Amino acid sequence: MDFNDQIESSGDEEEITAEAVLKTLYNAWQNERLSPEILPHCNEMVECMLGQIQHMERNINKLPKTDLRASIHKMELSRIKYIICNYLRARLCKIEKHCIPIINEERQRIESGTNYLTPSEYKYAQEYLLNMEGHFKSVVLDKVPGNMQTFEMNKMAIYPNLQSHVFLKANETVNGVVLDLPGEQDEEIDLEEGSQHILLYKPVADLVKSGKVQLI
Amino acid sequence: MFGEKVIELIKEAERNPDTMDPFNDEKLRQILEEMQLLFKMNMNDANATSENRSLWTTVQVRHAALERNKRCLLAYLYSRMNKIKTLRWEFGSVLPPDIRELLSDEEYQWFSKYSTNLATYMRSLGQDIGYSGIDLTENLKPPKSLFIEVLCVVDYGKLELEDGDVIMLKKNSRHFLPTSECQTLIRQGVLKQIT
C-alpha cells in the first residue's frame, strides 16, 4: 500500500520514487500558481502520478470498507487529485487569459522543440482563440462600419505582467543575477542556497523554469 | 455626446462583478446605430473636403469615437465571456433555465463551444496511460474530509455511488456521503452541506 513499493511494478527506465514525483508535482503546482506567466508543462509527472493513483485505487478497493487504512489512503489520494486538478486548471486559466501572446510564442517554441504547452493544451488554446474571435465577429464586428471590422489581435492581447514581484527561495546557490530595475542602475545579486527573497519576476524567470529557485 | 451609451454598458458590466445580467440587446443595437451614423457623417465630410482641410478635425474626433465604441463593445463582450466561463465550471455543460435566459443566442453558442472544447481537453488528459480523462471541475476545492453530511433539498431520485450502493435522495432527507461524489450535486443545488 505504500507509494514506494508500487513504483517497481511500473518499471520505468529511470529510477524515481513516487514520493519524488509528488514533490516535483507539488513544486510545479506552487510555481505555476505564483508565476505571472505560463511555465513549461510537466506532463510526464502528471501522467506518472495518474498511473500511481490508478494503482493505489485498485489496491484500496481490495481492502474491506471499514479498514482504517483505506480511508486514510483515500484521503491522501483525494489530496493528490486536487493538486493535479488545480495545477492543470491554473494552467488553463493562464492559457485563456493570455491566449494570444501564448499562441504566438508557442509557435516559435514548437519549431525549436522547447514547447511549454502539451499538444492538447495547445489545441485548446487555438480553439479557444478561434471561438472568441468567432463570437466577437458575430455579435459586434460584422455589424460595425466597414473599416473597423478587423479583429485586431495585437490590441486584444493581454500580456502577463512580468514586472510583478514574487517571493522565492533559492534551491541552490546562484551567483550574479542581474536585476535591471527600470530607471535605476543594474544591480547584481547572489542568491544563496536556502535564502528567501522578494524580487521582480522577470530577472528570475529562467531560474524558475530551470528549477534553481522555488516560488513561495 | 458620442460614446455615452457605451459607457453605460460598461458600467453595467462592472456594477455586478459576481452576477450575470441579462444581455443588453437594445443598447447594443443603439450603439451600433450610432456607429453607422458617425461613419456616414465621416464619409460625407471626408469626400467633400479632400481639398479643404477645415473639417479634418471633426472627422478625426468622430473616428476616435468610433474606435472607442468598438473597444468598449468588445470589452463588454469579453467581461461577459469571463462570467460565462465561470458558469461552465460551476454548473457543468447544462445551464439551469433561469441562467440560460440571461445569455444572448450567440453567447449561448459560444458557451457550448467553450464547453465542448473544455470537455475535449479534459478527455485527452492521461490518455497515453489508458486513462479516460479527468473531470477538472470535480475538485475545485481542497478536500477537507472524506465524508460530509448533506441535506437533500429536492426530490432527486436514486443515486448510485461509486462502490455500487444505491441511495434514495428524497426532499429533506439527510445523508452521510463521500465528498467527491456529492460536489456536483451540491453545486447544482440538489444537496446542501450541513456540517
Image: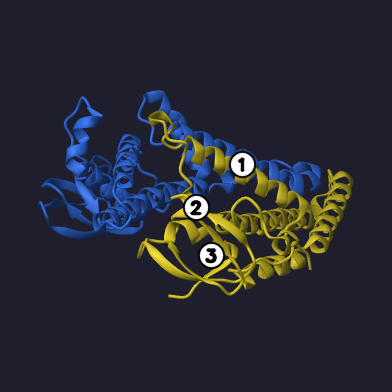
Q: Mark 1 or 2 closer to N-term?
A: 1
- Which of the two marks, 3 or 2, is nearer to us in this view? 3
> Mark 2: few, some, or many residues within 10 Å (few <14, many ≥20)?
some
Q: Is residue A195 left or right of residue A135?
A: left
Percent of width and height locating residue A29: 32, 50
Which residue in the structure is indicated by mark 3?
A: B186
Q: Residue at x 59, y 62 (%)?
A: B188
Residue drawn 69% across and 69% down? B12
Helix, strand or loop at label 2? It is helix
How far across and how far down the image is residue A136, in percent? 69, 47
Query: Which residue is found at the position 61% from the left and 46% from the top?
Result: B115
Who comes first in sequence, dot 3 or dot 2?
Answer: 2
Kindly identify which residue carries mark 2.
B137
Hue of chain A? blue
Residue B134 visible in the displayed image: yes
Classify the position of the C terminus of chain A by image quarter: bottom left
